[in-house]
Image (cartoon, rainbow, N blue to C red):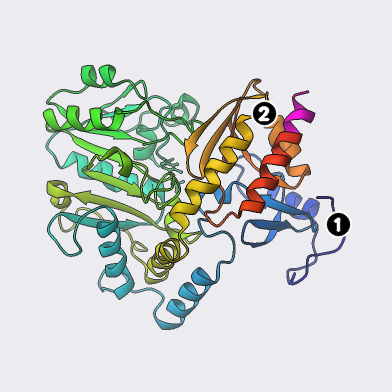
Amino acid sequence: MTSQPTRPAGWAGTPVTGAELTARYQDSVMNTFGVPARVLARGEGSTVWDVDGNRYLDLLGGIAVNSLGHAHPAIVEAVTSQLQTLGHVSNFFISEPQVRLAEKLLELLGGQPGAANGRVFFANSGAEANEAAFKATRRTGRTRVVATEGSFHGRTMGSLALTSKAQYREPFEPLPGDVTFVPYGDAPALEAAIDDTVAAFVVEPIQGEAGVVDPPEGYLAAAREITARHGALLWVDEVQTGVGRTGDWFAHTSSGVVPDLVTLAKGLGGGIPIGAMIALGDAATLLGPGQHGTTFGGNPVATAAALAVIATIESEGLLASATARGDQLAAGLARHPRVQAVTGRGLLRGVVLTEPRAADVQAAAYDAGLIVNAPTPDRLRLAPALVLTEDEAAHAVATISALLDEVLA
Ligand SMILES: *Cc1c(COP(=O)(O)O)cnc(C)c1O
């Protein structure tokens, strides 16, 4: 898709170029990430446009966030009408969307609404959901937490303590302590690391930031068995994998495992910031009155957005669609000689290249009107909206294949 000098139809922003906004960004926004390559202006479904009028097929979905794509009418309507009715209430008051979302999440996790077997704490991000879970683990009377190599759990001090990447951790040490790391997917190593002093094992059912890394079959079941035997909590971080992304409501669902703690964020609000920490069974009462809180947690607008996301996944059959479109992408891309493997499930996919040039492919993809991401030197990550169509998936396969021919020739 070539650059067009004209602005897209419906464009209503200020007339400004990408180059100009990038310069102003550099002079005003803190440089914690590096300067992004494009300035986006508008989106619809799986398509976004930048301020210079270029059009892209969005295969990243705001990193697994825009589960219903851009500007989905269900989210627009839910957020707009909730904001017109009651926008924020504080922790001193209950609002109906908050209660309905808590009940719905418990129902999706297999519990019964209102039953004594689960409770939800609402936060505003993945890191915050993990902070809540981390604090809950301290209420077991034990302090040790086991996490995995390659993990990503967020950037706050607590969630960073559980994140393995040295480059993220080291500038901020000392971090909250008593965290040890075991190789991901290695059940014997977990067995060796967990004893009766461990409060919790925290694990992603598929490692997202590590490049969409699948554990071996049976890993979560082994983790459940080992943690249960030692009275430790099993804490599944579903921030990236949850809410339909893998074709199931949660990536751990198919393992048959019932965790003690589940954390959610990214896809839950479909673009509206929200996180949730769900504690099941005895874990539900670890945190008591006065022990945790956040001003915006359970905000009516954010919870209304999440309810709209879940209702739309149900009404539009998006779990089945995530599986079908994900299989289509995987099958199409796996045929390319420069692709070693396609990892992940549903619409969270890693494309493992034969050469460590994923960053070059990402840059070329932008020029070709496709948004993909390179989380590691040899992997592309795809996490498009669950509403991705069959034609869009076919276009994605064709375009990525052509890019691999060109860049990795
Ligand atoms: C993105 C992510 C987080 C952190 O979420 P934020 O909303 O960025 O704080 C935590 N865990 C996993 C698995 C993630 O992918």
Does residue 42 belong to the magenta stretch? Answer: no
Residue count near mark 1 (Cα–Cα under 10 Å), binned few <14, some 14–19, many ≥20: few
Is 111 placed left or right of 366 in the picture? left
Report the number of discs.
Answer: 2
The quadrant where ligand 1 appears is: top left
Q: Look at the magenta stretch and give its main secondary structure.
A: helix
Give whichever of 18, 352 is nearer the camera.
352
Residue type highlighted by circle 2: His
Is 332 placed left or right of 188 in the picture? right
Which residue corresponds to mark 2?
A: 336
Give whichever of 34, 372 is nearer the camera.
372
Quarter holding residue 336: top right
Quarter holding residue 196: top left
Task: Please state which of the two labelled residues, at mark 1 or mark 2, is closer to the viewer.
Answer: 2
Residue at x 76%, y 37% (from the top left corner): 364
Residue at x 70%, y 37% (from the top left corner): 400
Write down the region rendered in magenta. 403-409
Q: CA distance from mark 1 to mark 2?
A: 31 Å
Q: Is any atom of residue 230 visible in this view?
A: no
Is 351 placed left or right of 315 in the picture? right
Give whichever of 75, 323 is nearer the camera.
323
Which residue corresponds to mark 1?
A: 4
Does residue 404 belong to the magenta stretch? Answer: yes
Quarter holding residue 155: top left
